[in-house]
Image: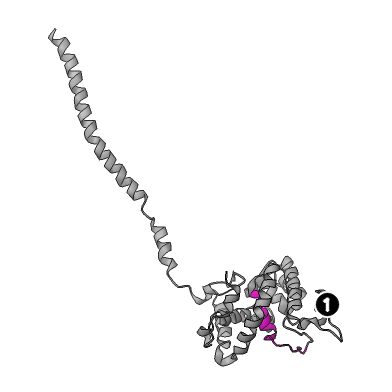
């Protein structure tokens, strides 16, 4: 009879002890889970590095680009050439205050046309490099802001004859330039190459690409003028957007026309 009572009592006692142990372990488990949750919500080291690097200023070469196409970083030859051409465009060497004045007057006409044709805004600087915003005729016969040859001008809709020369019409010549640029881009698929082709000619550049089996402008072997052409355009962009860096006292007024 005593044994029958002892067995149920032992079972009840065992359950009671287990309940006590379980109740004691619950807070510990909750603390552990909370601790783990806090660890999981901590910013990973890689993200914290990104935040720190975001405050680090970019090198000059990393800042430079043409139509969002960057120069090859780490290429010492390209870097030396770029710095040399930038140095040639300081105020003491070029004194381009007249360019700033004319650009401020004409860029508001050029920029919307470029945008309408889906052409990067940086192409407006080609006009400055091509003609210096002058209206003279080159020894080869190119004329106007975009320096069109007579035959090319006619191909893209401009009238050029003894009575009329629409190469000097800012709006019409810009539309013609956009058509020409857009057509070249279809085959080259690089705005940098298109800029180089604008200087040397589409056919000649394609021939060099095929002969050299190379379509990276910065690695191609081109004639001296074309080989430095895009560098000059980038330099012109720099002195127009950051005049004080290069010895010009004029403020950054041109960007107001392209504000987003």
Q: Would residue 220 be seen by someone viewing this image from the given angle?
A: no
Question: Residue 1 appears at what percent x and percent y?
Answer: 14, 7
Q: Position of residue 95 (x, y in %)?
A: 59, 91
Decide if residue 209 is on the left or right side of residue 8: right
Give the image quarter of residue 152: bottom right
Is 216 left, or right, of 62 in this rendering? right
The answer to whether residue 66 is left or right of residue 148 is: left
Percent of width and height locating residue 157: 82, 74
Q: What range is drawn magenta here?
A: 122-139
Determine the residue located farthest toward the top in the rendered image.
1
46 or 34: nearer the viewer: 34
Q: From what the image shows, is residue 135 above or below residue 171?
A: below
The residue carrying mark 1 is: 154
Find out whether residue 127 is within the magenta segment.
Answer: yes
On whether residue 13 falls in the magenta region, the answer is no
Residue at horizontal 52 percent and vertical 72 percent from the top? 62
Quadrant in the picture for residue 191? bottom right
Front residue of 194/115: it is: 115
């Amino acid at each position: 009879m005593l044994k029958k009572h002892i067995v149920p009592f032992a079972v009840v006692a065992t359950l009671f002890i287990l309940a006590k142990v379980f109740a004691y372990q619950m807070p510990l488990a909750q603390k552990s889970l909370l601790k783990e949750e806090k660890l999981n919500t901590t910013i990973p080291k890689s993200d914290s590095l990104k935040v720190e690097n975001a405050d680090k200023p970019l090198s000059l070469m990393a800042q430079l680009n043409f139509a969002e196409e960057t120069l090859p970083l780490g290429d010492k030859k390209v870097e030396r050439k770029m710095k040399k051409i930038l140095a040639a465009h300081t105020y003491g060497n070029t004194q381009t205050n007249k360019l700033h004045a004319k650009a401020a007057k004409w860029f508001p006409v050029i920029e919307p046309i470029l945008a309408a044709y889906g052409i990067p805004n940086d192409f407006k600087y080609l006009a400055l490099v091509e003609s210096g915003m002058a209206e003279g005729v080159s020894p080869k016969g190119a004329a106007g802001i975009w320096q069109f040859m007579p035959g090319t001008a006619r191909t893209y809709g401009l009238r050029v004859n003894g009575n009329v020369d629409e190469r000097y019409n800012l709006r019409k010549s810009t539309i013609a330039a956009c058509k020409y640029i857009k057509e070249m881009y279809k085959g080259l698929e690089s705005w940098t190459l298109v800029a180089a082709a604008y200087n040397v000619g589409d056919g000649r550049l394609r021939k060099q690409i095929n002969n050299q089996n190379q379509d990276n402008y910065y690695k191609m072997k081109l004639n001296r003028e074309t080989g430095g052409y895009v560098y000059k355009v980038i330099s012109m962009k720099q002195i127009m957007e950051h005049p004080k860096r290069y010895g010009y006292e004029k403020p950054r007024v041109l960007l107001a026309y392209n504000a987003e």
